[in-house]
Amino acid sequence: MTEKIKTKRGIYLLPSIITTFALFAGFYSIVASINGDFTLAAISIMVAMLWDTLDGRVARLTNTQSTFGAEYDSLSDLVSFGVAPALLVYEWSLSDLGRFGWLAAFIYLACAALRLARFNTQVGASDKRYFQGLPSPASAGVIASMIWLKFWNFEYFDIGVVSLSYYIGVAITILCGLLMVSNVRYFSFKEFNSTDKASFRFLLLTVLSLIVLLYKPNIVLFAGFFIYMLSGPFITIFWIYKRRQQKKRGRAR
């Protein structure tokens, strides 16, 4: 099912302020990356994700969605989930790999820009249960949490001058970029119904997850984002298989 979303042309203060907070967090991540504070840069991207989630929900709850807000949000996302993670992963390790390193970072940035442009053209015309391609905040979350996990400190990955973890970082960076512009389907979680009877169990699970998150945030976030990144191909394969089975049943009739 598709849903037409009507947007207004006005500028609404509250969602725009929240989007500005997200933009500032992304910019601060860039500054931290340049200064070599990679942990702070990664955490700043996570903060930008939090503000990015809030601005959309506030706009929907207060009925203040507008064309300006959508465009401003996209520009903020490009900085926070495109430029910031690309620069972070480049400064973290890809700069040691020469031309191959900055090309990998640029591939990620270009794919993030293409993903956001495609998303804007599909607003109101796509199945809101799924995203087409890995969402840019989730992709940035994979990279930021990977670096926050201090992946490069795993000594058993060392193989001489350049750690094997750097090459794994390159592979994950390029994979995230390609998944953003792919046709792989990802759950959007937009149709969660808070009035459903199962919501109490969901609330209990959320509380338990929060406790674990506060205990080891870098490990939990990396595991969560990485599993979500891998879930798309499995969902897509299952969807294709289901479609083929339906076609076979239709022919049999």
Image: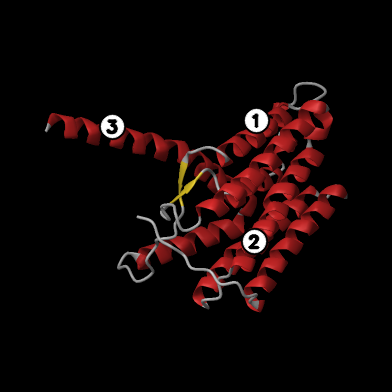
**Residue 141 screen position, x and y as percent:** 63, 49
Q: Amino acid at mark 3?
A: Arg
Q: Where is 201 relative to 230, above or below? A: below
Q: Are marks 2 and 3 in contact (CB under 8 Å)?
A: no
Task: Sort mark 3 into few (<14), some (14-19) or many (20+) by Cα contacts within 10 Å.
Answer: few
Residue at 29% x, 36% y is 243
Q: Amino acid at mark 2?
A: Glu
**Residue 52 screen position, x and y as percent:** 62, 62
Q: Where is 18 relative to 242, above or below? A: below
Q: Which residue is mark 2?
A: 71
The answer for how far apart the CA atoms under marks 2 and 1 are is 31 Å
Secondary structure of the residue carrying numbered label 1: helix
Q: Which residue is mark 1?
A: 171
Q: Which residue is mark 3?
A: 244
Q: Where is 164 relative to 141, above or below? A: above
Residue at 83% x, 30% y is 96
- Indicate which label's residue lies in the foreground, 3 or 1: 3
Where residue 147 sits, quadrant-wise, is top right
The answer for how far apart the CA atoms under marks 2 and 3 are is 38 Å
Relative horizontal placement of residue 35, taking residue 68 as reference (left or right)? right
Q: Is residue 43 visible?
A: no
